[in-house]
Amino acid sequence: MNKKIAVLGSGSWGTTLSILAARNGCETLLWGHNQQHMAALAQDRENKHYLPGLIFPDNLSVTSDLADVAKFCRLMLVSVPSHAFKDTLLKLKAHVSQDIQIAWATKGFDPDDGSLLHEVVAAIFSPQTPAALLSGPSFAKEVAAELPTAITIASSQPDFAGLLADILHSERFRTYTNSDLIGVEVGGAVKNVMAIAAGIADGLGFGANTRAALITRGLNEMIRLGVKLGGKQETFMGLAGLGDLILTCTDNQSRNRRFGLALGQGKDPTAATQEIGQEIEGISAAKETYLLAKKYGIDMPITEQTYKVLYEGLAPLAAVQNLLAREQKAES
């Protein structure tokens, strides 16, 4: 292929995406901010913390220096937590030229003001900077194990989406392109809030009926917010909407779901976070989604009750009772 890509973020998903690109014949550079961690990756040729036993391909190299990244290529795939997204791009900007191409696998809003991440990219670089988002139902360990997976690559620039699809698409990793960047961004952020809610319900001992209702009504909330922000309704019925929502709400590989389970079982949020030991994007997404709903006057009751559990100390059972006590109305 004679193509190059730099992946920023050496967690489970960033490492997986770098391995995937390298397996597909792309010269790949994986960057992480922790020098000690990256030195260990370079020595071990695997990420023993997140993906033990998965040996790096020969065409995958690692660094902790953003200057190395800037020299390596102009195509960047960012896979850091949403709270670190803006800061990572600001640090990157000091090293790169304006012809950079930015893709990201980060799901969430900017915690400073609730901005969508494509707005952060445009503000730091340029509105003309090629920008794309990878999203959809995909657990890192399953992709790394080459289990069949399908994702969406969203961009308003079809050529850039096609370039990323060429780099990542394989026999076991199917890439679809989508022009609705806003819809895919909203889906990827809000699904984490719903996964916490689903986990809470299961942790309280509620059954499949409850989970199905929560996923369905949660999808409704996602659509209302997404369409208001400029997304297309049909996007939310695809991989980055319904697909990712089902995955994160129903499988315990989801950190957000496991966090909700712990809350439903009576555990303290801080203790639950420490026990999981990885970033739980739904915690910040709950606050940012709730504030956006208030700003635009959108009815998002599941989001509101999840926010109150996380930020106002509302008991999980009381949150469920608040939802059930809502006034009866037509479904649509």
Image (cartoon, rainbow, N blue to C red):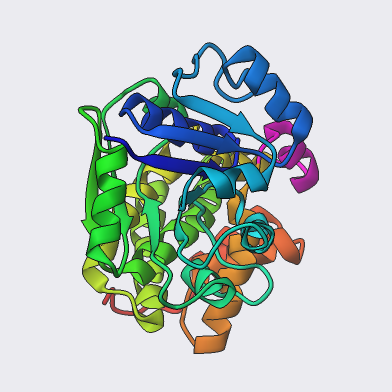
- Is residue 153 found left or right of 10 in the rendered image? left
Against 20, residue 298 (above or below) is below
> Is residue 275 found inside the magenta-colored segment of the image?
yes
Image location (x, y in percent) of residue 150? 26, 40
What x and y, as percent, mark residue 86? 64, 64
Look at 48% across and 26% down and name the residue there.
60
In the image, 154 versus 184, the foreground residue is: 154
Could one spot residue 28 in this view of the protein? Answer: yes
Please tell me whether the stretch drawn in magenta is mainly helix, strand or loop: helix
Residue 177, percent from left and from top: 23, 55
- Tell me how many marks there are: 0
For the residue pair 317 and 128, the one nearer the viewer reads as 128
Does residue 148 lie above or below 217 as drawn? above
Image quarter where the N terminus lies is top left
Q: Which image quarter is the C terminus in?
A: bottom left
Of 103 and 188, which appears nearest the observer? 103
Q: Residue at x 43, y 57 (%)?
A: 188
* Residue 314 visible (yes or no): no
Q: Is residue 270 left or right of residue 76?
A: right
Magenta-span inclusion, residue 263: no
Q: For the point 44% across and 24% down, which residue is it?
A: 59
Question: Where does residue 183 sit, x and y in percent of width and height?
Answer: 35, 68
Question: In percent of the image, x 56 and y 77: which residue is there?
Answer: 123
Q: Which residues are magenta?
A: 266-278
Position of residue 35 relative to residue 163, above or below, is: above
Tell me where residue 57 sits by quadrant.
top left
